[in-house]
Every structure is written in structure tokens, then in C-alpha cells.
Image (cartoon, rainbow, N blue to C red):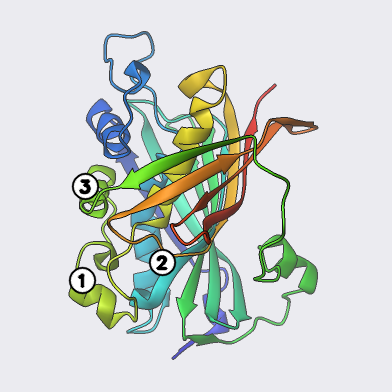
Amino acid sequence: MRIPAVVLGATAGPYEQTIDARWLMAYAAALGERAPEYFDTTQSGGVLAHPVFPVCYEWPLVLDVRAGVLPDGIATRGVHATHRLQLHRRPRAGDRLRTVATVAALERRSPGAYLRLRLETSDSTGNPVTTTDYGSLYLGVDCELPPAQTSREAEEDGRSPAAEELRDAPDWSADVPIAPTLAHVYTECARIWNPIHTDRAAALGAGLPDIILHGTATLALAISQTLRHDSRGVRAPVRSITCRFGAMVRLPSRLTVRGWLPEPSARGSVVRFEALVENGRAAVREGQIVFGH
């Protein structure tokens, strides 16, 4: 199986969706959130969107690209590998959002083909809301390398050695139980359906050991813990989130989310974080959340 180089630059969309309070609240509930900001519809400005909520309205475009450009049998082999989200502002109930997806990178890696989508979302006035680089790894799949791909671009797309670097001791740590039904609940509340997360036969058929938790759910749980360790709480001004995904999260199991104190930068206050599975391997690694000044 091979992904042809001609997919580079392929687009999907625009896809328009209306964001409502029910969707925002359901997403927060799936993550076990309890903060009233996520649920109180009487508050000024309406309910708050979880910082990782944009994955919900981006998912249809991911599916459209897979259906439109990938040869038969390849889409089911895709696993989430990298994520880079820029929040121009958080989405709000009542927003009519317009999303366009573009295949921005295609690379050959040892586990398979790496494909990165650029997802750009704007509101009804044309102002940007979110921009996401969503990287997927298609296990056991080859690809034709586009001639313009450079080593520097590969590094910027997260193509660093697989070995995890030793790091300084974290400043805080929190255990997060993963319920056996979390993938099913997250699927319905996020409106993100991929059978490898809820259908054991589909997961085994894709070469996985069992159903696994969504990468976006794992990331969202880690971000929730990071916000709980910020003095501003869930309303902290999140500007961007980046990470790489590693170990699969089984159900049921337990995550350990670890974080470091904020570090100043030109971009804002930067907090590093990671999420480890029970054997100590990183499910989310090289995580960074940038807060506005």
C-alpha cells in the first residue's frame, strides 16, 4: 500500500458547522470536567469551550480528506501522531464556523507514511478562530516522497528521534483514571467516530492490540490537568497547544499527567507537560501549552 505524492496540496471543504452549548457541554462532560464555566448557560458569554474542543468540528474534514485522497484500505491504518493547535480565540455557542483542510506534508517514516493536514477555521465574519496541524501516521504504509520536501521541514513537522529525552523532574503530577467506557462516551460527546476506538473487531483488524483511547481525548485530559495547576483555572488564555503522541492508551487504565512551572518566552508563558501510561511510556510527549500575556 502506498500514498501517492499527488495528494500533497489536496483540499477539502469548506465545511460549515454551527457550534451550540449542548456540544460544548457534552465535550467537557466526557472529560470529567466539573468547573461551572463549562456548563452554566446563564453566565455572561455563555458556556466556555474546552481548549481542545476544536478537534470536534475539524474531524469531518479529516474524514473528507481520507476519503478523497487515500487509496482503499489505508485510512483504517491511521493513528494520530502529532498535533499543533493555535487558538486565535476559543469557539463559542452560536458560532457558525467554516473549516478548510489542506494536505500540507507527506513523509516516509519507519513505522509508515506520515501525512499532515492544515485545518483553518474562521467565523461568519471571516476572522480566524483556530489553525491546526494534524499529523497522522499510517502504519505499514509507504508513500511517494514529494521532491520539494526538505530535512528542515521534516524536523519542523516533528520528525525527531523516537528515543525520549531525559528531562528535569516535574513540578507536579496527577493520576487520571481511564474508565473502560471512556472511548465510547468520548466518541458520542465529541462526535468523533473512528471504529478503532469503540469496535474491538475493527481495532484488531487494523493491527492494534485492542480498542484504544483517542489521541485527542488523551491530550484533552492532559490539558485539563494543566489548567487545574494554573492560578487562572479554566479561563486561562490558552494561545497554542503542541504535542507528539506515543504509547497507546488502553481501556481501562490510568494516566499520569506531569507538568512543569511556566517559563517566559516571546510567545507568552510556556508550560511543558506529558502524559504517561501505566508502564511509564509517554502517550503524550513534548507537550507545550502557551498562555497569552
Whether residue 265 is situated above or below residue 161 in the rendered picture: above
At a point 39% along the width and 23% down the height, the residue shown is: 48
Q: Amino acid at mark 3?
A: Val
Badge 2: few (under 14), some or many (20 or more) residues near its Cα, within 10 Å? many
Q: Which residue is mark 2?
A: 65
Q: Is residue 174 visible?
A: yes
Type of the residue with mark 2: Val
The three-letter amino acid code for the residue at tag 1 is Arg
Q: Secondary structure at mark 3?
A: helix
Q: Which numbered disc, 3 or 2, marks the residue closer to the eye?
A: 3
Residue 2 horizontal/vertical position (percent): 48, 89
Kindly state the secondary structure of the residue where label 1 is placed: helix
Residue 121 position within the rendered picture, expressed as x and y whole percent measured from the top left: 48, 43
Q: Which mark is residue 216?
A: none
Q: How far across and down, in percent of the image, does residue 5 sit?
A: 57, 82
Q: Nearer the viewer, residue 81 or 1?
A: 81
Kindly identify which residue carries mark 3.
Answer: 185
Numbered badge on residue 200: 1
- The image quadrant of residue 106 is bottom right
**As drawn, is 202 to the left or to the right of 71?**
left
Distance CA(mark 1)–CA(mark 2): 25 Å
Around disc 3, counting alpha carbons within 10 Å, would you say few (fewer than 14), some (14 to 19), or many (20 or more)? some
Q: Are marks 1 and 2 in contact (CB under 8 Å)?
A: no
Q: Quadrant of the C terminus?
A: top right
| Residue situated in front as seen by the camera: 11 or 52 | 52
Mark 1 burial class by Cα count in 10 Å: few <14, some 14-19, many 20+: some
- Alpha carbons under labels 3 and 2: distance apart: 25 Å
- Image position of 255 with respect to 225: above or below: below
Quadrant of the image occupied by residue 253? bottom left
State the residue in front, 80 or 87: 80
